Image (tube, grey):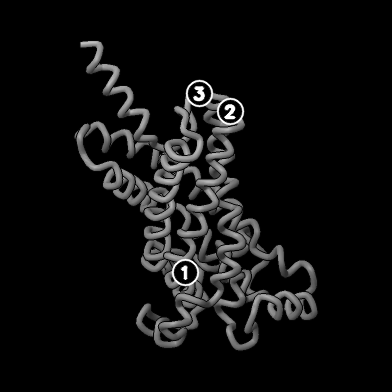
Amino acid sequence: MQHTNVHPIKYSSISTCFTTLLREQGPSAFWRGWTGKFFGYGVQGACRFGLYEYFKKVYSNLRVDQNKSLVFFVSSASAEVIANVALCPFEAIKVRVQAQPHFAKGLTDGFPRIYASEGIHGLYRGLIPLLGRNLPFSIVMFSTFEHTVNFLYRNIIQKRKEQCSRAQQLGVTCLAGYAAGSIGSIISNPADNIVASLNNKKASSVKLAVKKIGFLNLFTRSLPIRIMLVGPVVTLQWLFYDTIKIFSGLPTSGHVSKDIEEDKMAESHSR
């Protein structure tokens, strides 16, 4: 929750954050900034997942024998840079609306107000820290997802992906998605706190933000709520994405090395 990032004294824990917001601002406080989050993360998700698949195919075709983990890293990083350029203005408005209730009501009045007072710099003030948060998250998230899918098919299910039912394939997607979202949250939590501090003008630079928040607090502040929220959200994103792929006649996401190894063995025996 954004308030625990920017008002750590007033909102010292998740429970006090909920009760204080409910008492002072009413139930509407929990929905404030939803338009920026909805549209911003919708655009980011489309770029993140769609471009990841595109870049993974491009980089895999460059060299057939290259390390798959490197392909996952580079593909996710390439997609995430583009996704964050699209997300950054929405994120700036969302954070400002949530932490400063009188600033604006939402996206429609928040966007022109920031642009009129601060220009394009105001909308992209947090781009570098945002990349610092989301690049590690995306790299770890996609890599964890790919390796978890591979592990589940090879060691738990012990069947080729094509031999599994749609329900089984989507079950693997959900398990791998939750693991990916949770681990990614832990890695990216320090940068998330810095982004919130910069967008709310609690600090004018990354160095000052780190000093004000405290090094240890960078890793621990808001971490439980991020894991609680991001894990299920990422799971739903993967489920939604792979459901579309299934109904489009495409295989579910995730590289399974056993399939490739078996294909190579079959080809060698046929020669």
Q: Is residue 12 above or below residue 28?
A: below
Q: Is residue 120 visible?
A: no
Query: Dividing the image into 4 quarters, which one contains the N terminus?
Result: bottom right
Contact (Cβ within 8 Å) of mark 1 with mark 3: no
Amino acid type, mark 3: Gln
Q: Which residue position is annotated with label 3? A: 163
Of helix, strand and loop, which one carries label 1?
helix
- The span from disc 2 to disc 3 (Cα, nearest Å) is 10 Å
Residue 166 circle label: 2
Residue 112 spot, x, y in % from top left: 55, 62
**Disc number lying in front (1 or 2):** 2
Local crowd at mark 2 within 10 Å, few (<14), some, or many (≥20)? Answer: some
Callout 2 amino acid: Arg
Percent of width and height locating residue 251: 47, 27
Q: Residue at 79% across / 73% down in the picture?
A: 26
Q: At 59% from the left edge and 65% from the top edge, which residue is drawn?
A: 110
In this rendering, the label closer to the viewer, 1 or 3: 3
| Cβ–Cβ under 8 Å for marks 1 and 2 | no
